[in-house]
Amino acid sequence: MKKVLVTGTLGQDGANMCEFLLENTDHEVYGMIRRAASPNFKNCKKFINHERFKLVYGDLTDEVSISSLVKDIQPDYFINFAANSFVGCSWKMPLQVFDTNTTGVLRCLEAIKDYQPKCKFYSAGSSEEFGDVDYSPQDLKHPLKPRSPYGASKCAARHLVKVYRESYNIFAVHATLFNHEGTKRGEEFVTRKITKGVARIKKSLENNQKIEPLELGNIYAKRDWSDSEDFVEGVWLMMTQEKPRDYLLASGETHTIKEFVERAFLAAGIEGNWTEVENDPIKTKFHRNSAEGETLVKISEEFYRPNEVELLLGDPSRIKLELGWRPKVSFCNLVKKMVQHDLNEQE
């Protein structure tokens, strides 16, 4: 029986990867988490007691733990989804972001080189590596121009994967993942913040309670959104190919955060309108029904980034052509799915 080591098991992608593997393969799955006083297993409830799943402890910032896991488990596949993945906070803790996202990948590669050189390794890249984009849609030939410490950390990891692949003949891929969301997305991310906020406002309206508006930053930023569950299937296709090759996962569509907000309120059955002041986005507001209705969304400078990436749009044609990957969930259905999940949690 083959073995798969998955990091970031408590997060969105790691949990979805574990679910996918347990449902679609007969492999043993080892889910790595960090030691914590009270870990949140909410994303893992579907598989935590599965007979082929084993929970293991490790930390990308600790070389000994990573080396020990690779040495003891002897995994056939090592899928690394662990990261400090919140772009907004990467300016506040850049050293920690690099230690986890870059040096952490190096620790994984070193462990594979030393203890299990036949193991296939996956490194999760990000569209934030492209940053201040030169053209759209972006493909793997696009220059790396990050605009955040997070994006820079992923660029560095990309180079390390290439170096180890070419130097030691390790099967290692660094895939560029554009924005991907879902019901397991962390509540600090803007998409989940929106859908949970909409669910909260919906409940307040139903109970005739005072509405606390949702506060957002730059709602005009454009992103290429997909479903995380579609992406983990694409990752597995990359891992099961004969030779390592990097790919890009994206929907090929772009939508503003403003549009995400509109779709989320519509999914909850709440109609609204924007009021916008030319050249002053901070005064933009989303009102219920009309400009005279209750304020549902307002803009706060607190949530603006020091250096914003305005547009991201990916070209997934290579993985579609070569590996036959296709996304199953549209942007509209993704928003509906997330809103419905958060409405159910309010009940």
Image (cartoon, rainbow, N blue to C red):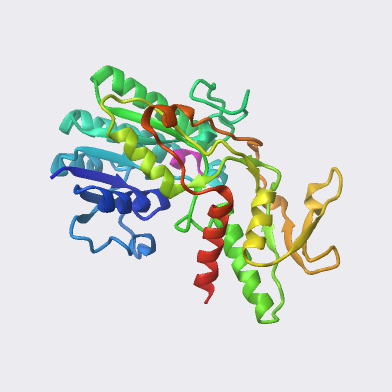
Residue closest to the eye, 299 or 172: 172
Asked if 248 appears above or below 84 in the picture, the reply is: above
Q: How many marks?
A: 0
**Position of residue 126 in the picture relative to residue 274 (left or right):** left
**Position of residue 128 in the picture relative to residue 323 (left or right):** right
Where is residue 343? Give x, y as percent: 55, 69
Where is residue 192? Give x, y as percent: 55, 57
The prevailing secondary structure element of the residues shown in magenta is helix
Considering the image in quadrants, where does the N terminus appear? top left
**Position of residue 262 in the picture relative to residue 192 (left or right):** right
Asked whether residue 181 is drawn in magenta, I would say: no
User: Which portion, as a residue range, is magenta?
Assistant: 92-97
Q: Which residue is at 38% across, 60% downward?
A: 43
**Position of residue 226 in the picture relative to residue 116 (left or right):** right
Asked if 322 appears above or below 267 in the picture, the reply is: above
Q: Which residue is at 28% across, 60% downward?
A: 47
Residue closest to the eye, 328 or 77: 328
Q: Which residue is at 54% across, 32% downward?
A: 314
Q: Residue furthest bottom?
A: 207
Where is residue 13? Give x, y as percent: 40, 48
Where is residue 104? Give x, y as percent: 35, 37
Q: Residue furthest top?
A: 167
Q: Which residue is at 19% across, 47% downward?
A: 27
Asked whether residue 94 is drawn in magenta, I would say: yes
